[in-house]
Image: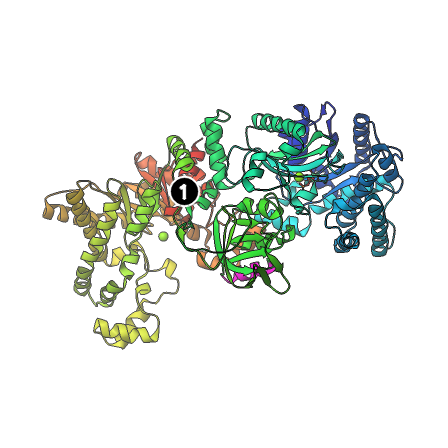
Amino acid sequence: ERYVYRFGGGVSDGGSGDKNLLGGKGANLAEMASIGLPVPPGFTISTAMCTRYYEEGETFPDSVRAEVAQGIAHIEAITGKTFGDATDPLLVSVRSGARVSMPGMMDTVLNLGLNDQTVEGLASASGDERFAWDSYRRFIQMYSDVVLGLDHGAFEEALEIAKEDKGFTLDTELSAADLKALVAEFKGLVEQQQGKPFPQDVHDQLWGAIGAVFGSWQSDRAKVYRRLNDIPGSWGTAVNVQAMVFGNMGDTSATGVAFTRDPSTGHNAYYGEFLINAQGEDVVAGIRTPQYLTKAAREEAGAKPLSMEEALPAAYTELAAVFDQLERHYRDMQDIEFTVQQGKLWMLQTRSGKRTAKAALKIAVDMAAEGLITREEAIARVDPQALDQLLHPTLDPEAARDVLTKGLPASPGAASGAAVFTADAAEKWAADGKAVILVRTETSPEDIHGMHAAKGILTARGGMTSHAAVVARGMGRPCVSGAGALSIDAKAKIARVGGREVKEGDLLTIDGATGEVMAGEVATIQPELAGDFGTLMEWADAVRRLKVRANAETPLDCRTARDFGAEGVGLCRTEHMFLEADRVTAVRQMILAEDEAGRRAALEKLLPEQRSDFAEIFEVMAGLPVTVRLLDPPLHEFLPHEEAEFSEVAKAAGVDVDVLKRRAAELHEFNPMLGHRGCRLGVTYPEIYEMQARAIFEAALDVADKSGEAPIPEIMIPLVATKRELELMKAVVDRTAKAVFEERGKTVEYLVGTMIELPRAALRAGEIAEAGEFFSFGTNDLTQTTLGVSRDDAGRFLGSYVEQGIYPKDPFVSIDVEGVGELISLAAERGRATKPNLKLGICGEHGGDPASIAFCESVGLDYVSASPYRVPIARLAAAQAAL
Ligand code: ADP
Ligand code: MG
Ligand code: MG
């Protein structure tokens, strides 16, 4: 089996289609080389080797050693340099690269191949002694950290002291002699810490680094990142070995990172940062404040240090041409790493750039308009879940702001929360249900769990492409980075800025769109849903087949849902209408009644209230279908539970406390979820459903009279298991309709159907369909009853179930396609065999989950119903499912 794939110098053994085997980085390096871009030559050791490495006790087979030797020979042939050569040595980088990018999660070693001899060769061959020793000190520092696992703090400290001794602030001020002394000190540190000298054999160095990159796949931080992002551990990482190019060869050399469009706003303008006389890591690590790429961006920010466009015009022009070529080739916004060595441009990485939801929308819509992609592709490019970011409130521009300082607008959105100064504190506070803003000097991959737990992230150092910024954008967390005026003392849990102090727990607000950092909480407003959002939604609506409704039970929810494009209400629960303060007394009176006459008397009082509830909802939803579910929960939910409440209620209801308590005890159930609820209430007390049906029909007629547009009530009977139950309940509804229509001398169109939420109902769907006109899959209860898992008690074990792969995802979030899904498709099939025009929908949490929506499309349901804020997500997901 082959494990090594070459690229560069006119050879590309792989290409962008080989991401699974070569990792994203390796596949794209090969692709860039094959389209003629300047890529330093190298080779990729495949992810298959990573898997084998772990299978065989972290060892390498001889065949791979031979392949790697050939790979090195390939690089030597193209560069004309020899690995380990004392006069003109080849140096390489050893880079990790998984299928999907895991920013900063895994390790990379630069300048490998330097030792006490080759450093002299590098100095004389390049004619630049300072550069050679700078590279050597970087190499020892990185290798000691990544491969030898030594304490990197000691090396950083030695570097700081070396600068301080000379009164320098920048690494670049150190002379060749300073760096030579520092290398000697570094080597001393290595010997002291590991008890043997720094490895001088370049082949040992190479294999050490390859092993370390494979090893980093199983590091704790990589594991956490994989868990948060659903990345299987079985994928493994590839290793890329590539000829070094040097951005640290003086003022005509530089290194940078860039995006072909703005990843935060989506604007079609080159966007990036670079540093003169520096190496790769320097830009992201925030060692110096990076410079702007374009003159326009520099001027807009009012910054002094020259942009790349001004400082290195020829390399910039070449880079801009590469941007355009890459966008045309990949037909997507690219995230790029480059280095300029003595005026010559080299490409070191490209990938589809991570972007905010706002940028994703704009880029998709713009690229479709530019003709780069089709509308269908634009629809497919936007992650429906990410729209969530846009549907939520932003800071009210009118609200007062107590601005503490300003940083860079690194990831948009606004967040308020208590300041915390460590990732662990963020996680702890969040677990206690508190909103927190994680405040750090800069973040590192070790902070990832805290960033995830935080509502927003604030850093004092680092640019727009710093770790904090990249990770925050990926997670959809608002972030302000590089707020340089902040001085943070994480140990003392305090931040100081302009004479003010922010202590742990103090409220902060950050605005990731402007970079502002404010004391206290700032009021928010609803977002604008026009522009690119509206355009993409229009395109989505044109291709989707599934209709999208909302689960809504108040006029406000219905309004929100309609504004978000809902085409009806898929689930209007009625129990909340029974719980309102002024009504619960009548409800309790009904429950306590000894006979039907008593219940009817109480229901009589509830009728006008229910009628006005429905009228308000029907008015908002005029002309659209509204599915109303008749009363579902067990009656004792409406009775008091506390001792004090009992006497109060007894007094109000005019009954003895003991009578009340006896009745409450009678109603007690061992397992209310499977108890006297749903249509079982209607079967035993048909007068309840009769009152509700009357309220619905009277309200519908009232609204039709008033607005001239009647709603289309779809009356839904819950928790049906048998055809007979539905028949009985439908008879109650039809009888009531007939009575109301006769009284009024008018009719409205209506349907009677049922929720399918019990396995028996799904199995007997063929005959149940004879008795009803629609099915709505109540997937919350159907999941509970199919899996035999109570949703409210699942928290204790479901996490372990998902971790151990028993269920691929939380079945209450994303439909269990194999089990619950099979019941749904079977019920749909059997129901439609009886009644071809049977209307089919889904209500329940799953109606807003993109994966579940794709499933609904595959079984041919007519609509999905989701909570109002998820309606746009469902519209886009439904369109993607139809593509
Ligand atoms: P990451 O995945 O963390 O970005 P990379 O492997 O891309 O790690 O490398 C880290 C940094 O080193 C990047 O800025 C990259 O551009 C730089 N780098 C990697 N290989 C080389 C090379 N052969 N020559 C010069 N710089 C390099
Ligand atoms: Mg990189
Ligand atoms: Mg239910």
- Judging from the image, the colouring scheme is rainbow
- Which residue position is annotated with label 1? 824
Above or below, 80 against 867 in this view is above
Badge 1 residue CB within 8 Å of ligand 3: no
Ligand 1 sits in quadrant: top right
At 88% from the left and 42% from the top, the residue drawn is 116
Q: Secondary structure at mark 1?
A: helix
Query: Residue 386: percent from the left, percent from the top?
Result: 48, 43
Query: Residue 685: percent from the left, percent from the top?
Result: 23, 59
Amino acid marked by disc 1? Ile
Left or right of 820: which side holds 606? left
Q: Give the quadrant of residue 683.
A: bottom left
At 51% from the left and 48% from the top, the residue drawn is 512
In depth, the one of 771 and 247 nearer the eye is 247
Q: Which residues are magenta?
A: 424-433
Above or below, 474 against 497 in this view is above
Q: Give the quadrant of residue 175.
A: top right
- Magenta region includes residue 426: yes
